[in-house]
Image (cartoon, helix red, strand yellow):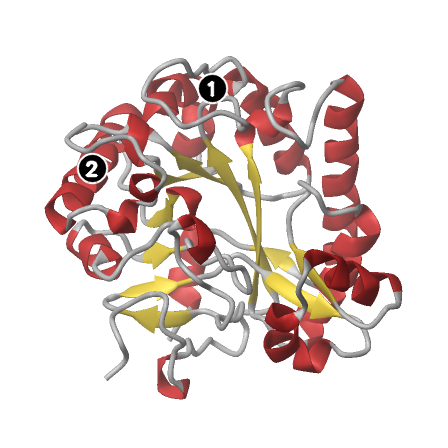
């Protein structure tokens, strides 16, 4: 039987199987959240939601390419996001999922600490209560049941998969493949790849990260050993090995296209893209500082959508993923 912990590498029989006509596909997810100062300690108060109206432009942009984005909503933005993208969700032009930021999601029964910012580190009863509060808020404002989830800070725990199944959530997309957050008290995904698998009653659909370069076939074993950090830079500059996540935040267009080609070559059935919604407006994240940065972000998406179309990869929704997975 497959280990019910999301952080445990799946056995071969747990890997998802797909209908022959399914792939390749790509899924656009947006971590739809409040703005806060990324350089300061997390707090229950002092955040903003000024960037939420910028979702309207991104929604219209996606629609021109036939892409149905999935907005992973956290608690503070649910009501405001419903005003902006609620009609698109109702019309099937967008989907909503859940994103749990414990420090701003009731019930507030824990101290705000770095360890507690990862939902899976909380007592199981509290993780469950926060998840249900978020699920119910989204259902109340959007009139739909969210079927997908992403833990804030990718912080899944030992009980997360079971709690999601109990809550009626069918897809988890918390795993950021090939990344390790254990130094800060979070999970270690360095041994986990980008291909979906079943775990604890849900389908894990990881955010896609791939290795490129001449040594990419050995990337999973080699990359974690490249330390200090400057060693990784040497391997990137020499074309030996590079880790590339599918996101416009910190990834260039050229890198993104290389990563797409590598993921398709590796047979990844669903390429999962992500970004933070505050990056859709200037000045809220380290990735988009000004208006020119916003335009660069849209240029990244335009180039990526064009490349995916040229490679025969079609957009997918959470509902499509569930239908296509056997």
Q: Quadrant of residue 166?
A: bottom left
Q: Quadrant of residue 255?
A: bottom right
- Residue drawn where x is 48% and y is 37% of the image: 31
- Residue drawn where x is 34% and y is 39% of the image: 117
Q: Is residue 100 above or below residue 25?
A: above
Q: Nearer the viewer, residue 254 or 311?
A: 254
Between marks 1 and 2 in the image, the one whose residue lies nearer the viewer = 2
Q: Say which label, 1 or 2, has the lower sequence index.
A: 1
- Residue drawn where x is 54% and y is 27% of the image: 39
* Residue topped by disc 2: 130
- Where is residue 75 shown, x and y percent of the image? 32, 27
- Where is residue 231 shown, x and y percent of the image? 75, 64
Q: Quadrant of residue 279?
A: top right
Horizontal side of residue 293 vs 74, given as left or right: right
* Residue topped by disc 1: 84
- Where is residue 73 shown, x and y percent of the image? 39, 33
Looking at the image, can residue 310 be seen?
no
- Where is residue 233 shown, x and y percent of the image? 79, 59
Task: Report the quarter where the C terminus lies.
Answer: bottom left
Count numbered badges in the picture.
2
Q: Nearer the viewer, residue 181 or 256?
A: 181
**Extreme front residue here?**
228
Q: Which mark is residue 28?
A: none
Q: Nearer the viewer, residue 180 or 306?
A: 180
Horizontal side of residue 245 vs 147, given as left or right: right
- Graded by Cα atoms within 10 Å as few (under 14), some (14 to 19) or many (20 or more), the crowding at tag 1 reads some
């Amino acid at each position: 039987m497959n280990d019910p912990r999301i952080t445990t590498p799946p056995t071969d029989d747990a890997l998802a199987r797909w209908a022959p006509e399914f792939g390749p596909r790509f899924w656009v997810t947006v971590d739809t959240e409040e703005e806060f100062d990324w350089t300061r300690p997390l707090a229950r108060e002092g955040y903003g939601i000024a960037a939420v109206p910028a979702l309207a432009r991104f929604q219209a942009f996606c629609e021109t390419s036939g892409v149905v984005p999935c907005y992973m909503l956290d608690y503070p933005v649910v009501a405001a996001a419903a005003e902006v993208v609620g009609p698109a969700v109702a019309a099937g032009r967008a989907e909503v999922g859940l994103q749990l930021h414990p420090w701003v999601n009731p019930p507030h029964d824990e101290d705000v600490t770095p360890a507690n910012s990862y939902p899976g580190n909380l007592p199981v009863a509290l993780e469950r209560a926060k998840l249900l509060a978020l699920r119910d808020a989204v259902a109340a404002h959007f009139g739909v049941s969210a079927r997908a989830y992403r833990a804030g800070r990718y912080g899944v725990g030992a009980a997360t998969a079971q709690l999601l199944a109990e809550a009626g959530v069918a897809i988890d997309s918390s795993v950021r493949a090939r990344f390790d957050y254990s130094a800060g008290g979070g999970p270690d995904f360095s041994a986990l790849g980008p291909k979906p698998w079943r775990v604890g009653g849900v389908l894990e659909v990881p955010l896609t990260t791939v290795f490129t370069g001449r040594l990419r076939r050995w990337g999973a074993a080699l990359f974690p050993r490249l330390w200090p950090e400057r060693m990784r830079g040497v391997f990137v500059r020499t074309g030996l090995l590079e880790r590339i996540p599918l996101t416009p935040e910190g990834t260039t267009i050229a890198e993104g296209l290389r990563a797409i080609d590598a993921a398709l070559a590796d047979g990844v059935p669903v390429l999962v893209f992500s970004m933070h919604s505050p990056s859709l407006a200037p000045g809220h994240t380290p990735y988009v500082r000004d208006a020119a940065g916003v335009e660069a972000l849209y240029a990244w998406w335009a180039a990526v959508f064009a490349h995916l179309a040229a490679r025969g990869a079609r957009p997918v929704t959470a509902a499509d993923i569930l239908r296509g997975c056997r």
